Image (cartoon, helix red, strand yellow):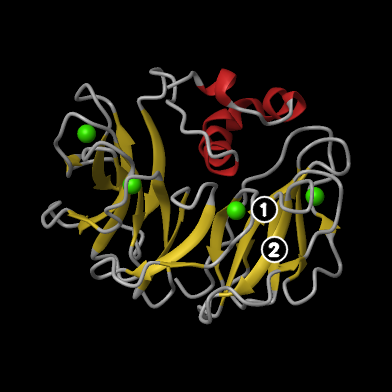
Amino acid sequence: MASPLSALSMPDRMMISYGFLLVAITILASVAFTTLTLLPNQFSAFATVPGEDGTKIAFTSDRDLNREIYVMNAQDGSNQTRLTDNADSDEFPTWSPDGTKLAFTSDRDGNREIYVMNAQDGSNQTNLTIDPATDEFPSWSPDGTKLAFTSDRDGNTEIYVMNAQDGSNQTRLTDNADSDSLISWSPDGTKLAFTSNRDGNWEIYVMNAQDDGSNQTNLTMNPAFDFDPTWSPDGTKLAFTSDRDGNPEMYVMNAQDGSNQTNLTDNAASDGLAEWMHSTR
Ligand SMILES: [Ca+2]
Ligand SMILES: [Ca+2]
Ligand SMILES: [Ca+2]
Ligand SMILES: [Ca+2]
């Protein structure tokens, strides 16, 4: 494993200007550039994901000498409980929509796989992917029945879906020689937004989630670095990060056709890595 900085092929200006967002950028970049990176030791706890009802946070820590997944009470950090316990890296926990399960990545079986476990106590840790390639970054469908993920099992980073219950029906949705990653489900579960460099630079795409990835459409169509889409709760808009105006800014656009791409932050500092507030929680 290389260090994060040396492993990343992200343009230097992005790495320098993001500063405090380095940790998140490192995670994103490890997807976008199919490079697995180890985060610096000083980031002992670097990944947080709120539970469905907002009362718990799952996170990753190396406090017990290697990366394990923990949960704690979101309000005050009490009841920090380790859910995984093995000598290899367990990380990137993400809550199922009903808050009962956590999907995560682990290399305990010799390569990166996607696991699920019961969020309550870490029981039933199950390897869903079982493939010698690098399988990572699981993303739950809104109804909790499917997990989208990335894998390089077919030679480069592609997006796949599988049944969340048992890993059956692992289906490739993208098929090209470049990288496809950073998946975001539309709120109704019918579409996936993602980032790809198939057209020569990083762009935001959407595709149908339910019929093997049809209608893959480039929404941004801009020579700059456009990445990390996230849907509005009503499914009509996508927020994303772009450096088209000289430094990373937060943009929104219409999810249907990429129209009305608007810079929301518009300042000299670095802005990005958005998460849209859920209107129904
Ligand atoms: Ca571990
Ligand atoms: Ca694997
Ligand atoms: Ca690809
Ligand atoms: Ca672009």
Q: In the figure, is residue 171 to the left or right of 237?
A: left
Q: Position of residue 184 (x, y in %)?
A: 55, 62
Q: Which residue is mark 2?
A: 205
Q: Is mark 2 within 8 Å of ligand 4?
A: no
Question: Which amino acid, by three-letter code, is at mark 1?
Answer: Ser
Is the Cβ of the residue at disc 2 closer than 8 Å to that at disc 1? yes
Name the residue rendered at 43%, 71% in the picture: 141
Q: Can you tell which quarter of the image residue 108 is in?
A: top left
Name the residue type under label 2.
Answer: Tyr
Residue 196 — which label? 1
Quadrant for the N terminus in the image: top left
The residue nearer to you, when weighing 196 against 144, is: 196
Picture coordinates of residue 268, whole percent (x, y): 84, 33
Total label count?
2
Displayed-image quarter of ligand 1? top left
Pick the front one: 16 or 163: 163
Which residue shows up at 61% across the image and 78% down it? 234
> Real-space Cα distance between discs 2 and 1?
7 Å
| Residue at image point 80% right, 68% down | 258
Residue 57 visible in the displayed image: no
Q: Residues within 10 Å of mark 2 (few under 14, many from 20)?
A: many
Mark 1 CB in 8 Å range of ligand 3? yes
